[in-house]
Image (spheres, rainbow, N blue to C red):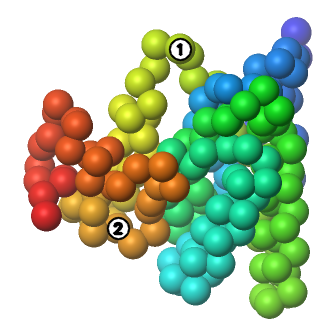
Amino acid sequence: MSYIFIPLDYKKPYPKRPRLLDSLSYTGIRGYLITINTYKRKKYFVHSNIVKSLVKCLHEVADQQYFDVVAYTFMPDHIHLLLTGKNEASDLNVFIKQYKQISAHKFKQKFETKLWATSFHDHVLRKQEDIKSVGRYVLKNPVRAGIVQNVLDYPFSGSFVYDLWELVESDPFLDNNEFTL
């Protein structure tokens, strides 16, 4: 049995992570929690103009590829996406490839450098996983990282499906004023 280890040192090559062998796990009406790192973990997502452009691209690709973006959070050097396929034609691999390709091309035209790391991390949601709970998990990332104290104060998070307050108000474990207005 062989294992692929992802290097901790960003200067070393970032290998492609093997996808699930069952390609059906990436198609159809399913939920996915995705993390995509920036190239060499550069902190590009602290600039509102960059994030705004990437959100616009995310919206366009989600529409074209039949995905709902339940929640997204652009951390300084990576993005978390909670996606659901809208129909049987929804293909996660096509979605990710197209999003990374289009956004990277626009980014490189403007900044003359790479945007994304080679691979991405995925988690296919199980039927028993509550989509709103996973959405709250995505939105709480800036709080856990100590960037903000309140989820609603973070400018680089959102949803194309829910109002953010709708996602966070249903949390039975509100604590530390994470969601106060």
| Image coordinates for residue 159, horizontal then vertical, percent | 47, 55
The percent coordinates of residue 38 (x first, y second) are: 70, 63
Residue situated furthest bottom in the rendering = 110
Q: Quadrant of residue 155?
A: bottom left
- Pointer 1: what residue? 127
Q: Is residue 121 above or below residue 42?
A: above
Task: Report the side of 59 relative to 112 (left or right).
Answer: left
Front-most of residues 119 and 31: 31
Note whether residue 43 is visible.
no
Asked if residue 138 is positioned above or below residue 110 in the image, the reply reads above
Q: Residue 177, position in %: x, y?
A: 11, 53
Q: Residue at x 73, y 31 (%)?
A: 87
Quadrant position of the N terminus in the picture: top right
- Say which residue appears at 35% left-offset and 55% top-offset: 163
- Closer to the N terminus: mark 2 or mark 1? 1
Q: How packed is label 2: few (under 14 Cα within 10 Å), some, or many (20 or more)?
A: some
- Choose mark 2 or mark 1, whichever is in front: 1
Give SS at disc 2.
loop
Residue at 75% of width from left, 58% of height from top? 61
Residue at point 83%, 18% (across, down): 24
Outermost residue toward the top? 1
SS of the residue at dot 1? Answer: loop
Rounded to the nearest angstrom, the CA distance separating label 2 from label 1 is 29 Å
> In the image, what residue type sits under mark 2?
Tyr
Label 2: which residue? 154
Q: In the drawing, does residue 72 fall left or right of residue 55?
A: left
